[in-house]
Amino acid sequence: MQDFTDLYWRLDGTTKTQEKVTALADFFAAATAADAAAAVGVLCGARQLRVVSTRQLRQWVAEETGLPDWLVEDSYAHVGDLAETLALLLPEADPAAAALPSPGLAETLATTIHGLRGASDDRKREVVTATWRRLAPRERIVWHKLVTGGLRVGVSRTLVARALAGLAGLEPAVMTHRLMGLAGGGLDAEGFGKLLDPETAADDRRPYPFFLASPLEETEPATVATALGDLADWQAEWKWDGMRAQIVRRGDDATIWSRGEELVNEAFPELVAAAEALPAGTVLDGELLAVSAAEAGPLTLLGFAALSKRAGRRRVPKKILAEIPSVFVAYDLLEQAGEDLRSRPLAERRQRLETLVPDCFAAVLDRGGEAAAPRLFTSPLVDGDSWAALAARRQESRARGVEGLMLKRRSSPYRTGRVRGDWWKWKIEPLEIDAVLLYAQAGHGRRAGLHSDYTLGVWDGERLVTIAKAYSGLDDAEIVEIDRIVRATTLERHGPVRICEPTLVMQLAFEGVSASKRHKAGLAVRFPRIVRWRRDKTPADAGTLDDLRRML
Amino acid sequence: MPSPSSPLLEVTSAGLYCAAGDFFVDPWRRVERAVITHAHADHARSGCGRYLCASPGKPVLRTRMGGNAVIDTVRYGEPTTINGVTVSLHPAGHVLGSAQVRLEHKGETWVVTGDYKLAADPTCAPFEPVACDVFITESTFGLPVYRWPDPASVAAEINAWWLANRDAGRTSVILAYALGKAQRIAALLDPAIGPIVAHGAVMKLVEAYRASGVKLPPIDRVPPRARRVGGGRALVIAPPSVLGTPWLKMFGESSIAVASGWMTVRGVRRRRNVAAGFVISDHADFPGLLEAVRASGAGRVLVTHGFADVLARYLRERGLDAAPLVTRFTGEAADGADDGAADDEEP
């Protein structure tokens, strides 16, 4: 645990890629296979078991320290990181317990996390308090994050792959592929050995590393043309509002992998059945989409919110299966007849895809209705004989329920990760409104103790009603300045939330407006974020609820 | 006993006012008579008619208030009378000459702490508990997450950091509040490691400290418009306001650290974006605040700047008559200069 703690703080202490890779390589070279395997799982974002709730931890800390619950909460609001808050509140480690040899990461996970599955609360508490007594505060922070399943390290899988590839003498791309599909956990010492063994064959079910598109900064047709050149070199598709996924059809079965590399077969049983009909040795890249039920009239897209009602489930009830049917819209073919096609040009992959999956989603959408039969489609291409024509098509996005256009270079291979140049997302410009800062709350992480989370409102007649919470969009200096204003203009405090005198106006961007019974305003904005602080405006200049209703 | 109808001290628009004695404690406006706990800018404003401070604090207060200020002094613990109110000053352990102000009138005793700490500090007299009926305490670090490490272990950390930098040929720059923290750190440094140099704002107060008899290691002033100072071996003490200014460029490759109680919290450390953070403060930590309250024996506690609401509520739940008291003292500036006030920029 000590070695892993040191690694955590080394990674935390630098923003330089090479230093991170070196820290990882040092750790893996020195660790036992069991600890290295456990660390790979943790670093690659394997879903962690949560046997102890954060509520229990807070309660036990309050009891151990004799502090009232509210003071633990106030401390958390100030520090902005629960694992750290609890580590700071607890008394110093017991020197006798701390002097004992520190168990490694694998053993720590086994005894203090996996071993507590199904244990009584008393037993959990006993193990947790004993662990507190032997860990120093810096170890406690890391351990708290492990126990609560909230460990995020500022390190990408690519860096882990680089470190391991160096150790094994393999290409980073090969290692990246070997690391795929580990999000479900379950890498053990033997598995770690195989990871480094040059002779290991590719896993049958493993997806390929996803190629990610970059946002296009230009938005005007003329500037897009300048940036991307001849339209004939590009393929345009709709940018779907769903979940990126790969269907891997190899051997006897089919698996569906989310971009977070979780196996989502259980959440999409009807798609698994459809995927099994594909010929063996096929890998498709595409989007999971939720569509309206067949009985409900013409088929329409339901959007990401509906899809997420299904995504995390282990078992999907019949009712939801019927209400939120899903389809898979394929836009790339990565493997055919067991052959890795990723280095072939997109144009060729697309042609093969259309042969393999003949049903085009456009036909279904335009025809309406018949969603029941096929569940796998190809993603339609969006035509336009000029950048201007394509830009005009892009303006249909909001009405179609998509996020804009994808532009892909016809000659491009299927790359790994977010590599700029060949795949671009040309999203539609967001909707905007000027809104007034009404409540503020202290942030987390780097913004701990600074009021950086804002609730904003617009006018409803003579009063301001809240419409959105926004966390991002301002720079550090602005946040510090706003923090001072918030403190100086606080009217009331409710725990960590300050109600402020309305003085600050923010330009708020969002992707759409929908009716909502949950919000006082009667509507909700999607993906709100602050574009800029309008120092030139006063609350009287802010937008109104009627402005938002017109965007519904 | 405290009578609610005529408190011995009350907050007015000009500051904490003692009507019975017609004087102010740490006023935030120009007034005729000011009793000063210590020379930080949020406690000592220039332009008052007369100042009263503890005698060890006079050279420092003089540096801050200017040559023409009328400054009376009393020794720690020596009572004096202002319009029938007995006033005495007692060590607060915050910075050189810092004092708690004890007021006694008609059998009732009040103490105003100003800023204080209980931890050891070789550059000033240690905090002395003073018994009272009403205790007015600061609460800059009034949350239980603030619990200071032993200053000796922090000193060892700072010296180890300096040594490692020196061996790597990097200058060490430590950002610390010009009055108090800078001198305290200087006193903790091991001069065998290399030369110690300081920013002009710090030097002025180093001289005032020396004039008061505080022993500090040899420190050189950074000359104006100097280049290549320190040769990668020196430790530079500078006020936090130099961060991000060209002034730092004269040291070549350097490692920058902040010394402040706020460095306890990782988010704050990361936000300051410096190589190291040392947890050392001239304010009381949470256990220190509770200990000071307990030692005063006061039944009524008024809590000023910092986490006033939090500390007052906690004390109330433990059976004390406690309430927040709104003042204009600062000390909450986690993103400002330091855990003192933001007046580190000397002209």
Image (cartoon, rainbow, N blue to C red):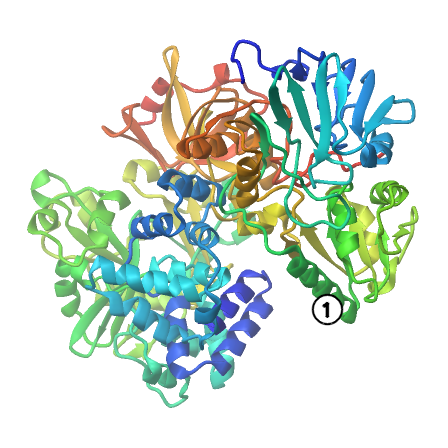
Question: Left or right of A306: which side holds B178?
Answer: right
How many numbered discs?
1
Above or below residue B176? Residue A510 is above
Nearer the observer, A107 or A479? A107
Q: Residue at x 34, y 70 (%)?
A: A109
Tell me the quarter of the image containing the N terminus of chain A: bottom left
Q: The residue under label 1 is which amino acid type?
A: Ala
Picture coordinates of residue A486, whole percent (x, y) = 53, 27
Q: Is residue A47 visible?
A: no
Above or below residue A246? Residue A322 is above
Tell me the quarter of the image containing the C terminus of chain A: top left
Image-quadrant location for residue B12: top right
Chain designation of label 1: B
Image-quadrant location for residue B71: top right
Picture coordinates of residue A235, whole percent (x, y) = 39, 56
Q: Residue at x 80, y 32 (%)?
A: B75
Mark 1 sits on what residue? B164
Q: Residue furthest front?
A: B107
Picture coordinates of residue B316, whole percent (x, y) = 43, 30
Question: Left or right of A107: which side holds B271?
Answer: right
Q: Is residue B100 visible?
A: yes
Q: Residue furthest bottom?
A: A199
Question: Left or right of A312: which side holds A503?
Answer: right
Above or below residue A54? Residue A198 is below
Picture coordinates of residue B92, whole percent (x, y) = 69, 37
Q: Residues within 10 Å of mark 1 (few under 14, many from 20)?
A: some
Q: Residue at x 54, y 52 (%)?
A: B266
Image-quadrant location for residue A378: bottom left
Q: Which structural element holds mark 1?
A: helix
Above or below residue B331? Residue A459 is above
